[in-house]
Image (spheres, helix red, strand yellow):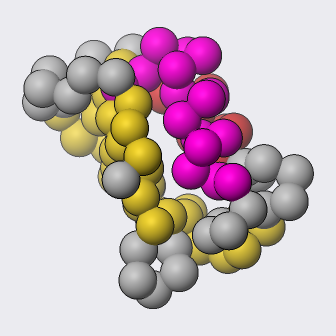
Amino acid sequence: MKRLHLKIYGRVQGVYFRSSAQDKARELGLSGWAKNMPDGTVEIVAEGEEVQLQEYLEWCKKGPSVARVEKIEETWEETSGQLKGFSIN
């Protein structure tokens, strides 16, 4: 189990990025959260198996069809094991 911490830049607010990210995370069996940040980015923390997290990262590089991802900062961490489900904050 791993934790993936993402900060996603571009046109990612107001384009259903968080809800689409939640749907994809649930599809992959990941736990975590997504939230809009004041600087216009979306921050995501996801925990799960590394294979599913890699697939999730690839999805986040594109996002939903109306989003325009310009850059992603990714940090791999050890899992806390405390996250349950996937929420939008």
- What residue lies at 79% left-to-right and 67% top-to-bottom? 68
Q: Is residue 51 at least partly visible in the picture?
A: no
Which quadrant of the structure image shows residue 4? top left
Between 31 and 2, the one lying in front of the other is 31
Check residue 22 for magenta coloring: yes
Residue that appears at 47% across and 13% down: 29
Magenta stretch: give its range. Answer: 16-31
At 25% from the left edge and 22% from the top edge, which residue is drawn?
A: 84
Which quadrant, please, contains the N terminus?
top left
With 54 as the anchor, is 50 left or right in this view?
left
Residue 31 at x, y = what percent?
35, 25
In the image, residue 12 above or below residue 52:
below
Q: How many marks?
A: 0
Q: Is residue 14 left or right of residue 88?
A: right
Whether 79 is drawn above or below 68: the answer is above
Residue 27 visible in image: yes
Left or right of residue 86: residue 25:
right
Task: Residue 34: give x, y in percent of width and height.
Answer: 43, 50
The prevailing secondary structure element of the residues shown in magenta is: helix
Outermost residue to the bottom = 39
Residue 82, image x and y in percent? Answer: 12, 26
Residue 28: x and y, percent?
Answer: 55, 16
Q: Residue at x 41, y 58 (%)?
A: 35
Q: Is residue 71 above or below residue 39?
A: above
